[in-house]
Image (cartoon, rainbow, N blue to C red):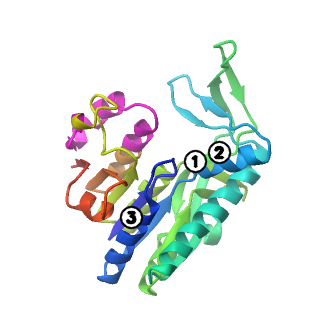
Amino acid sequence: MIVVKIGGGAGVNNDAICADIAAISQRGEQIVVVHGTSDAVNTLTERVGMEPRTLQSPSGHVSRYTDADTLEIYTMAAAGQMNKMLVAKLQSLGVNALGLSGVDGKLMIARRKEAVRAIDPTTGKQRVVRDDYTGRVEQVNGDLLTLLLNAGYVPVIAPLALGLECERLNVDGDRAAAQVAGALKADTLVILTNVPGLLANFPDESSLIKHISAGEVERAIEIAGGRMKKKVLAAQEALEVGLSRIVLADSRKSAPINAAVAGEGTVISR
């Protein structure tokens, strides 16, 4: 079984990815899709006259600031626009895709980050943000996904989870995919992005790091920059929940998932 995370940023080749999902599904392999939504949320936010906002933690981690108003836009973009676009595209290729978010069937339960420490961009000082609707996935309903897979569906999951008080929460798609892969005991987690993998000297694509052992992941997190840091962190969490193989790979090539499974990209393994 393969769990594939489709990046939500600009430059991701959704047509090539969906064609590859169709090829994998049609040869009888089970596959689960988790997708991001960052570019779609930014576009929709700007369209309604709001400015996309982020929070930077003291450690340098950057996340989307999701207050109550932004949560509504996030829900529309993630569970609506992006999810249904991918489902329709897969259906056109003969894949019986089924779109859902982590809210549906309690698919993903997350703990809300009720107090987030962030660096004020104006003063450079720390402040505490308490109205942020983001969380970290703690539980995945693997039985529901297994039921859908055995019925012949390809689940397509939006990064929206149910909080402990049944509130909707924005969750990181890469880290959610790691938890989904762990719950299903997947053979491989493929995290697709718009670069060949982890680069030692970004943006020099010839500096691709082809293999990272479990013992080298902490160092890899230090090397990674920007969004790639979160992807390596997700790979680390996937190892912690039992996976033995994660591949950070390029979505821009033809048959990107098959290429990743064959080892093209950065392979992180035990």
Please state if 72 lies on the left or on the right of 190 as rendered. Answer: right
Q: Position of residue 54 (x, y in %)?
A: 64, 33
Mark 1 residue crowding within 10 angstroms, few (<14) / some (14–19) / many (20+): some
Q: Which residue is mark 2?
A: 42
Mark 3 residue crowding within 10 angstroms, few (<14) / some (14–19) / many (20+): some
Q: Residue furthest bottom?
A: 151
| Amino acid type, residue under disc 2 in the picture | Asn
Q: Position of residue 118 (x, y in %)?
A: 63, 25
Q: Earlier in the sequence, mark 3 or mark 1?
A: 3
Camera-nearest label, 2 or 3: 3
Q: CA distance from mark 2 to mark 3?
A: 23 Å
Please state if 205 lies on the left or on the right of 41 as rendered. Answer: left
Magenta span: helix, strand or loop, mainly? helix
Q: Residue at x 20, y 55 (%)?
A: 263
Camera-nearest label, 3 or 1: 3
Question: Which numbered circle lies on residue 16?
Answer: 3
Please state the extent of the stretch shown in magenta in the rendering: 207-233
Q: Which residue is mark 1?
A: 38
Q: Secondary structure at mark 3?
A: helix
| Amino acid type, residue under disc 3 in the picture | Ala
Can residue 40 be seen at all in this image of the molecule?
yes
Can residue 101 be seen at all in this image of the molecule?
no
Q: Position of residue 89 (x, y in %)?
A: 51, 73
Query: Contact (CB < 8 A) between labels 2 and 1?
Result: yes
Q: Residue at x 53, y 68 (%)?
A: 86
Q: CA distance from mark 2 to mark 1?
A: 6 Å
